[in-house]
Amino acid sequence: MALSKTARLDRGLLTRAALDAGRKLNPRCLLANPVILVTEGVAALATLSAAGQITAGEPAGFALQIAGWLWATVLFANFAESIAEGRGKAAADSLRASRVTTRAKVITDDQIIFTPAHELQPGMVVLVEAGDLIPADGEIVEGIASVNEAAITGESAPVIRESGGDRSAVTGGTTVVSDWLRVRVTAAAGSSFLDRMIALVEGAGRRKTPNELALAVLLAGLSLIFLIAVVTLLGLGRYSGVAIPLVVLGALFVTLIPTTIGGLLSAVGIAGMNRLLKFNVLALSGRAVEAAGDIDTLLLDKTGTITFGNRMASEVIPLRGIAADTALRAALMSSLGDETPEGRSIVSFAEGQGISAVRPDGAITIPFSAQTRLSGLEAGPTVWRKGAVDAVLKQLGITERDTPRDFAAAVDRIARSGGTPLAVSENDRLIGVIHLKDVIKPGVKERFQDLRRMGVRTVMITGDNSVTAAAIASEAGVDDFLAEATPEDKLRLMRAEQAKGRLVAMCGDGANDAPALAQADVGVAMQSGTQAAREAANLIDLDSDPTKLIEIVEVGKQMLITRGALTTFSIANDVAKYFAIVPALFVGALPALGALNVMQLASPQSAILSAVIFNALIIVALIPLALKGVRYRPVGAARLLSRNLLVYGLGGLVAPFIGIKLIDLLVSTLGII
Amino acid sequence: MDLRGWAEIALTLGLSVGVAWPLGLYMARIWAGETTWLTPVLNPVERGIYRVLGVRPEQSQGWKGYSFSVIAFSVAGFVLLYALLRLQGFLPLNPAGFGNLDPHLAFNVAVSFVTNTNWQSYGGETTMSLLSQMAGLAVQNFTSAAAGLAIAAAAARAFAGDREVGLGNFWVDLVRITLYVLLPLSIVVALALVATGVPQTLHAAVTVTGLEGAQQTLALGPVASQEAIKQIGTNGGGFFNANSAHPFENPNPLSNLIEAVSITALGFATFIAFGRMARARKEAASLVIVAFLLVAAAAVAIYGLENQTVPGLLKAGVEAGQNLEGKEYRFGTAASALWSALTTGASNGSVNAMHESFMPLSGGIQMFLIQLGEILPGGVGSGLYGMLVMALLAVFVAGLMVGRTPEYLGKKVEAAEIQYAMLAVLILPLAILGFSALAAVLPAALSSLLTDGPHGLSEILYAYSSAGGNNGSAFAGLTAATPWWDTTLGIAMLLGRFGYIVPVMAILGSLAAKPRLAPTAGTLPASGRLFSGLLLGVILVLGGLQFFPALALGPLAEHFQLLASLRP
Amino acid sequence: MRTYIRPALGSMVLFTLLLGLAYPLAITGIAQTLMPEKANGSLVRDRSGTAVGSALIGQNFNSPAYLHPRPSALAAAYDASTSGGSNLGPLSDTLASRIADGAATLRTELNLPADYPLPADAVTTSASGLDPDISPAYALLQVPRIAAARNLPVGKVDAALKAATRGPLLGFLGQTRVNVLKANLLLDSLSGEAQ
């Protein structure tokens, strides 16, 4: 299932969101959003006051319209949140569909008992055979099988799962395609990975992230300040001979408090999580996503992340007096029986150079062993061997003194460049050297450059010696590397970075990565990794692509930027609203204040109404931005800020002047007031 | 307006920052406990004081302990001063034989001086005995300033440290700042002022017979010693009713220059000391620049306004291009306009011209500078922590826009900080607008006004702005020595001082405990043009949003009325 | 709590002794020793050595023979036992009528036409009510009256006023101003010589 495909803005979604927005008028739903709750309160008061005017037989058109638009403000804010939630709900629905009730085969004392999946307890061992649905999350105790994990990852090609090692975790809801597995259950029913995923996607129990919390405090504080500013106008106004109607005071208050960001705040958060889902990353907490935006240092395993993970032949160097073709052919023949990735890479390299060979009939493969440290092929009288340089030399009886000088030079050059030299021989003759090297994944270098521009330092971690590590590090363009690293070294490095006040992210999949993942400020586990790793991490990459961290960082940043931008916009808007409402309130008693009516609004009433309408409509206008997020580009912080300040600060200052004026023109031309 | 006026403004402003630089670097050394050339003389005194106080100087206090100390110290100061004022009639050094102060006036004065406001509900030369002036008011001039500076030192430590619990020892900061900074500076400035003609005598008055045979009684006293600390410590409570407009407090342009520079010097120096101690020189320089730009812009605007047509003069056919009502001729409009900006920007509150007689918009600007939170550069110490609160808010909003959890000087700004910052920010509108709205409808309050209409509202707004901002200057037409005004202004002063200090200390405690993060390419730089512009914008918008409606009813309305009255 | 009370009260007592007594007394001692004239109020004496006022504090003059100061907002003009300004704003009607009255009186007294543009300092009160100075323009307007009252040539009066005039410090700090008391002392000494 590809989560991204399910979240489309269709008509059904909109209808559902609109209905939901109405349901959310229940004040209890708004408790988490004080700004909107207060707006609703003011709307209710305005309605009562309008009703009072009607019963008293006074004209109530103005009060009614204000009240109407105040209710609209609340509805629009609810609508924004509902749309954002709707997308997540749609995704959750399709996940739920894959959660079928199965019967598990529980193994007890050589006996298999069929048990409903929801009665499984952690610690039980179940048997899963080809065609079975894995009934619960667990760790493989025995067996190897190919598993279709499409239900979780959306990727239909089966993956290999086996006991021991780093691919031993299985997820409930996935299907065994071939062979069988014995699985020890690790998660009780209801708290399985799939259950948690559904809950996360749906946004159930979503807690405010730290920055969201801080922002909510700021907005509440601002609202209090405006409450003081507005309420005290009663006294100050009375001194000046102005009686301010309650409806107008309420309208002023609502236009001043940050309803724009208040209305869109939770939508931004939900939309951010949804964007992550689009990248097939599951955030176990919003905190982790935000923290991803703050990352200073990224620790990356070399293997599988920066390089393809296998050493590949990149060159075959013939000894002096030996034709290049001969050397290539010897290298090819020596690897024909070698099924390791390195061996296959030699074959494909030679073939790529135009050498082809078929395995001679009756040829015998010389297998690699830890003692000989070489492998080869024996066909009739000819024996081809390849292997570690000293092993091959020993096999051939060549002492150090006798080693041909150009051979030694080639070996030395390869080693210094970070590669691995393999010697090749044909019968008793030394033929040449194969250069095996780590191949950097394409595009990796550019991504590291992006990260650097974001202010993230990359550190490569490898078990290689420092010469090799340095060569790869410089080729890949990482900022630093840690060579000959043990898991303890990794943890130590992370703690050292954190002690310097840096926030550290890392990706990992192996069981020995768990401590480091737990220690990391942001730990991304691969879906293909071990259960231990998945438990320790706070983000799970369903695609098992370690470079995904870059997208995660971007989403984290985008979420913060969007909130900041909307806050700035919201506050900047208030300037224009003051210029609309303040002269309108006081011009009767102090005609000189007409000079503040810089927008030349038609009448005091139309000015106030226009400001209220603008305040409500701007929420709707900004919903797409809240859902999509402000674009993030990896440029320096200063450039990013100046651009956003220009757009949302200055824009927020200017836009309402234009908007309120236009609405006022419309309102006064139509004669609504 | 003329070139001389601009030159005077430029020189004074330039000197105020210029002097602050070395002063700030010196003060940072005092905060850090380093030795200076004064150490050989003062160290034994310092040690002696610690022994008497029972203070272990090496013991660092957490934010709560530090705050308790500040409050305990202020309470002790209040009690002593209140007692002194209530009993001055029975005490010596009272040559003019003034009586004891009323309870509400004594409360107001004691609060006023302990909170570094130095609002004067009284005329000094007609109310206070010499003992009250010297042992009461002048002492508080030192100690309230030292308390503010001590908190600034704690602020610097909070940012400088990496996961620290302690903010320093308040008693040590208090003693060191008093002995090494305030006292030597005061001695130098006091003697310089005597040289310009400011009296320093224990005689309360001298009576002379003038050329026309009339008797003239000249009020005198130990003016210079008090004038010096009054400016340096941003106190502003004058020896005389007319404050620094009185020729004995400020006899000529030279004394005016010395005093004007003294108003902001230590305030700016605090920023610089902070920058040095918190290892954030560039960032501190940005704060200086923002404060400087705002106060300079205000000075320029007020100077321009004071040279606009004055309706009363125009109608009488008098040269109407200079507003000289309430101004001393020796200073003219330039020095008066500049001083009014410096004293309101710096929470000083001394005046060399009567603010109530300034043009309406000038009065509005003066009020607004106070309402911005007294951070330009504000009271000594208090200006710095006020500005830091603004910087935290600016960094928070803007920091989000660069996609990182906001941090300032390497410290993450999170919910706790924002919560306390908003609490602190709330105090000023509550004190200013809350009390103003009450006073605006209460007959008991309104009877103290000199005028009605928008100008009367300006009197109210200015009074509570001054009290809440701990400034101390006034639209002095208001008769404030009544129970309502003395009491509510006193409460506003307490709110403005301690309602701000406590949340600020909580912020400092929280920040101190955080790791100091190293900046990266993704960190928003808290210096340079962009940040300064941002901070400027946040200060103006936040202040404007709080006070615009109130200002519209007062000074703005009067300003437009003035423009309308000039239209033919 | 006791850990706070002792240093709080102790430091207040110590500071009162140090800053409230020792500091002002020390400054007084130094000032009285080094600069006694200034420290005691810059008193100005007539030829007999009697103090007639302070060079820094304005004095009220009503006689046509003397240079007149600016109006004073004090209950008793130039009563230097108090100080203060009018605190009237530019839009105040009280101020407008006071200025109008003052200007009319002044024009009559100085024999000026009814629309003569008087200098502003002649009709505005200072902040302290004790302003010792007036503008050269206002002084100049008074020359004919003084000369007539004293029976002195205009040039001599003018010179006396010039002698009591100080320019801005360094050419730009403060205003060019005429010290009223000093000018009147000079005028008296001129008259003394003439007699």
Image: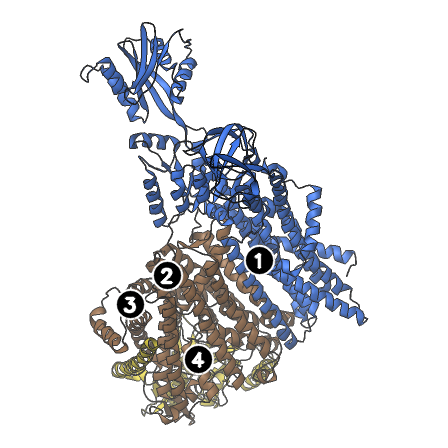
Residues marked 3 and 1 touching at CB (< 8 Å): no
Q: Report the amino acid beneath label 3.
A: Gln
The subunit letter for the residue under badge 3 reads: B
Mark 3 neighbour class, 10 Å CA radius: few under 14, some 14 to 19, many 20 or more: few
Q: Report the amino acid beneath label 2.
A: Ala
The kind of secondary structure element at disc 1 is helix
What colour is chain B?
brown
Asked if badge 1 and badge 4 are on a common chain, one would say no
Residue B509 figure quarter: bottom left
Left or right of B497? Residue A68 is: right
The letter of the blue chain is A
Which residue is tagged 3?
Answer: B59
Residue furthest right in the image:
A57
Which residue is tagged 2?
Answer: B158
Gap in angstroms between the C-alphas marked 1 and 4: 36 Å
Residue furthest left in the image:
A401
What colour is chain C?
yellow
The subunit letter for the residue under badge 4 reads: B
Left or right of A99? Residue A477 is: left
Residue B111 disc label: 4
Query: Which-is-in-front pick, marks 1 and 2?
Result: 2
The kind of secondary structure element at disc 3 is loop
Residue A516 disc label: none
Asked if badge 3 and badge 2 are on a common chain, one would say yes
Mark 1 neighbour class, 10 Å CA radius: few under 14, some 14 to 19, many 20 or more: many
Which residue is tagged 1?
Answer: A571
If the image is split into quadrants, where does the C terminus of chain C sit?
Answer: bottom left
Q: Is residue C146 above or below residue A322?
A: below
Gap in angstroms between the C-alphas marked 4 and 2: 28 Å
